[in-house]
Image (tube, grey):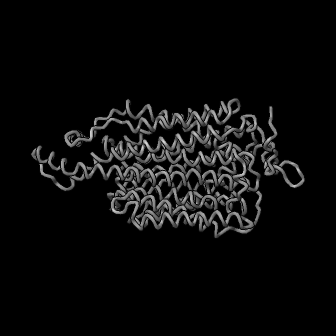
Amino acid sequence: MTDVESLDPAGTTSSAEAEVSTPSKHAGLALVLILTAQLMVVLDSTIANIALPFIGQDLDISQANLTWIVTGYALAFGGLLLLGGRLGDLYGRRKLFMIGLATFAVASALGGLATNEAMLLASRALQGVGAAMAAPAALALITTTFPAGPARNKAMAAYATMSGVGAAIGLILGGWLTGLDSFVGLDVEGWRMTFLINVPIGLIAAFMVPRVLTESESHPGQMDIPGAITGTLGLLGIVFGLSRAGEEAYGWDDPQTIIPLVAGVALLAGFAFIESRVEHPLLPVRIFANRTRATSFAAMMIAPAAMFSMFFFLSLFIQQIMGFSSLEAGFAFLPFSFGIVIGAALSSNLISRVDPRFLAGTGTLLAATALFMFSRIPIDESPKAVLSALADGGADVNYWTHIFPFIIMMAVGMGLVFVPLTLTAVHHVRAEDSGIGSGVLNTMQQVGGAIGLATLSTVALHFTNKQASDVAGPMADAIGANGGQADPSFLQAAIFSSSFPEGATHAFLAASILMLAASAVIWTFLDVKHTELATDAPEGVHVG
């Protein structure tokens, strides 16, 4: 059946094909600018991970609330992406791209200057707002700058690579900056530079946008404000409720867990109702009418949920259990950058000859295996072993045997996933919907990451708290038996060292199950042929 999204009323091909029939004369510079922006917004999903212990100590933020430094950004980013994508479609993607980059830079400055928890979390939310305007415009500008076929495949491969490399670079850069006492003469805490470094990059990129990129056609229409409000608040309610569920002070039966979850589900139901009734919906149902696209969206929601959770828990594990410094922890993730480049390059070269199902399906299986192996990291949680590890500066876990091989496996797997699913997710979207199509894809990634981190943090906190209650007494006895005194701060550190690995390994196991679910979706429903991706022709018209 011919896809009506690719035809205008007269039956001719849509403006999307005409719009990209020849590459822009500034295509190379445009791609560099788009990739820089993508690197910046993805990098900020993880750059603060390494700095979390330092931020928590400096601003007196509890362990439970530290996750909101990561989740708050992802939630604001994901919750507003649909609105950002639609605004780009209506009023011009270049304009939204530029405003988004400038907003992101200003928010980064506020985060770097934060003096308390509220100011930092507010700045992270504002960063998410800026990213929500810039990210969907960036991906849409690729589809309208490069024609279908090898040129677009390479551009998408670079974009998808940056999505994964950015996460790893964020950890490396975060580790380096956090370990600095000063930066180019600035006497500020290192963790603040993880935010301040975005300011000049964002402002320069915003300045270059009108000089390199051409503006897209505008399609003025009515904004779906009720949809934006219900959708964003619904996601916020679900993530907040899941976060509360994992905290020892609340739990699943506490009103502060139940009420946000119920309200979130009700608001999302209201969002779905509004979208099916309004004339200009924020999320057009037709975006999901295409099976290939719907499958890609679903898989790209589940897989990043597992991946970003891996970064969060593994970065804490490496620092707080293995005793790595912030810089060493950052470089521990350097192999991920190389691995995802290898995976993305393989995908880019094979996508013209191999169907997306086989590439993405294999990638998710590799990633699931890596996550499972992280859950098997051998760690002795007995009081005697923990006290010995604290004395030695870290647990006896071999990085090269138990961490390195599976970081590489995870990275190659995600490189095989991102490229084909990014291509299939935006293929056949008509020109005036390319912003919202890109917005949906980015929304699935960010919302999946936020909900995944909240869910897996709940899993981790459950097992961490259970283990902590079990070892508190024996740990105090062990400290006394060694001739020491059960100093409250030392006892708390010992209990944490004994209990956190229990929570983290269960989180890795849950993440591997999530990745297997993404794999099942891909193998079952993603049946588009590689020949179809080589053309902007209507769906159903097979080439070759």
Q: Nearer the viewer, residue 138 or 402?
A: 402
Q: Position of residue 494 (x, y in %)?
A: 23, 48
Eyeballing the image, is 298 above or below 275?
above
Is residue 105 in view from this perspective? no
Residue placed at 74% from the left, 50% from the top?
A: 429
Instruction: Give x and y (percent) for residue 4.
Output: 81, 51
Which residue lies most toward the right here? Answer: 10
Q: Residue furthest left?
A: 483
Q: Is residue 517 left or right of residue 194?
A: right
Residue at 76% across, 65% down: 220
Decide if residue 246 is in sight here. Answer: yes
Residue 261 horizontal/vertical position (percent): 49, 63
Q: Quadrant of the N terminus?
A: top right
| Left or right: 402 as drawn, with respect to 482 | right
Residue 323 percent location from the top left of the image: 30, 42
Q: Is residue 30 left or right of residue 2?
A: left
Q: Residue at x 50, y 44 (%)?
A: 514
Q: How many marks?
A: 0
* Quadrant occupied by the C terminus: top right
- The quadrant in which residue 159 appears is top right
Quadrant in the picture for residue 383 = top left
- In this rendering, the answer to whether 10 lies above or below 382 is below
Q: Is residue 115 above or below residue 34?
A: below
Q: Is residue 492 left or right of residue 340?
A: left
Q: Identify which residue, 394 or 28, lies in the foreground.
A: 394
